[in-house]
Amino acid sequence: MSAADVETKNQASWQDDAARDLVRNAGDRLAMFVRGEGSSLWDADGRRYLDFLAGIAVTSLGHAHPVFVEAVATQAATLAHVSNYFATPPQLALAATLKRLSGAGERGRVYFGNSGAEANEAAFKLARLHGGAERPRILALKNGFHGRTMGTLALTGKDYLQAPFLPMVPGVEFLDSTVEALEEALDDRVAALFVEPIKGEAGVVPLPDGYLAAARELTARHGALLIIDEIQTGAGRTGEWFGFQHAGIVPDAITLAKGIGGGFPIGALVTYGAAGDLFYPGTHGSTFGGNALATATSLAVLGEIERAGLVENARVRGEQLRAAIDAIGSTLVEGCRGQGLLVGVVLTAPVAGAVIAAAQEHGLIVNAANESTIRIAPALTIGDVEIDEFADLFARALATVQDALLLDDTTSEASA
Ligand SMILES: *Cc1c(COP(=O)(O)O)cnc(C)c1O
C-alpha cells in the first residue's frame, strides 16, 4: 500500500488492516495518525489531537521539530551507517555529551544500542561481567519494568508478563521498594541492583524518599553495582537531566533510550568509574547501535534541550500542570505522582481506560498506565497554550466519565 493510500483510508478500514496484518502482541490500535507538529497530531480523517503522551516520553521536542528534521535530513545525506568496525564524528560527540550531562566524568564510557531493552541488555551483561561465578544474584524491584526481550523480561518484576515465557534467565530476585528490603537482600553474592527512579510503567510511582542514597551506600558496601534505568526518566523529563540527579548520588551505570532520540530509535548504556572497564573486545555489540544517523539525531535533540532550557521548562511546566489538574477539582482525581513532566494522575476509581477513551473523544491523547492511573508525558517544549488546552480537554474527559458513572448508579438503583 502506498503512503497516499494509507492517508486516504477511512478509520474502519485501517482497523481491519491492522487486525489482519499485525501480530496480535498488543491491544487494538487506538487511532491512526498521519502527521504531527509540536504537540499536535492529526488522524487519517484530518482531526487534530493534543498529544500529552509524546509517544511515551519519546518525542521530547514535540513532532517534526525543525532541529530534529534538519539533523535527520543532513546526516542521512552525509553518512548514515558504517558498522562498529569504524567510528563516526556524531557517535563520538554524543558519547562525550552523554558523559558530560550524566556526570560520568573522565572515566565514563558509553555503549550504544537501538532501544531501551538493548540498553538494559547491555547493563545486564555488565552486571554478569562484574559478578562472575561469585556473585550470581541480581536484584530488581517488584512491579519494575526494564523491557521485553528475554534478558530484560527477567529483570521486569511483573509475573503476568513473564508467565508465558518461562523459564527466565536465572539469578534475578525481586524486592519490595523499601530500604529495609534492600538491606535484608544484599550480601556479597549480589552483582547488581537495577532500579528506576520513578516506575513509569507501574503507574508513575517514585522511589521512597532517601531510597537512592541508601541504595548507593548499601550496594557500595557490598561491592554490587547500582544500575539506574533512566529510559523513561532521562533526557530532562523530570526536571533534571536524569532522575537520579535529584538524589545527588553517583551510580555505576545508567541506561537511556526514549527521550534522548526524540523519535529516532536509540538506546545507550553509560558507565561510571571502574564499571567502564568490565566490557572487553568481543563481549557485546550491535550492528545498528550507535550509527551516525541515530547519534547525530540524538546529539541534535540533546543540544536543543540544552539550548532552549527544556530541563528547566520540564520542572516549571510540571508544577504548572499539577496545579492545573488540581484546579479541575474533579472527584475522580485523588492527586498526582511523579516529577517534572512525568505525571501520574491517580484516580479515585479504576476507570483509567474510560478516561483515556473520553479524552481521545475530546481530542486529547494521554495513557492509562494502569487501571487507576493516567500517565501524562508531553513534549518538554510545552507552554501556557498547551497546558490551558490540556486542562480544558482533560476536565471535559473527566466530566464525561463522571457523568457516565452517575448514570450507571442511577440505572442500577432504579433497577434494584
Ligand atoms: C520503555 C522502557 C524500557 C524499554 O524500552 P524499549 O525501547 O521499549 O525496549 C525499559 N525501561 C523503562 C524504564 C522503560 O520505560
Image (cartoon, grey):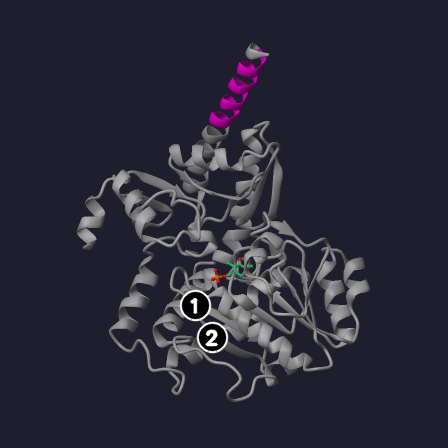
Q: Position of residue 66 (x, y in %)?
A: 31, 59
The span from disc 1 to disc 2 (Cα, nearest Å) is 7 Å
Q: Which residue is mark 2?
A: 112
Q: Secondary structure at mark 2?
A: strand
Give, as a single range, the part of the protein colored magenta: 399-413
The tag earlier along the polypeptide, 1 or 2, is 2
Left or right: residue 280 compared with residue 92: right
Q: Secondary structure at mark 1?
A: loop
Q: Amino acid at mark 2?
A: Phe
Q: Quadrant of the N terminus?
A: bottom left
409 in the magenta segment? yes
Asked whether the beta carbons under mark 1 and mark 2 sit within 8 Å of each other, the answer is: yes
Q: Position of residue 259 (x, y in %)?
A: 46, 60
Left or right: residue 145 compared with residue 36: right
Badge 2 crowding class, 10 Å Cα cut-off, few under 14, some 14 to 19, many 20 or more, is many
| Number of numbered labels in the structure image | 2
Where residue 194 sits, quadrant-wise, is: bottom right
Where residue 61 sits, quadrant-wise, is: bottom left
Left or right: residue 309 compared with residue 12: right
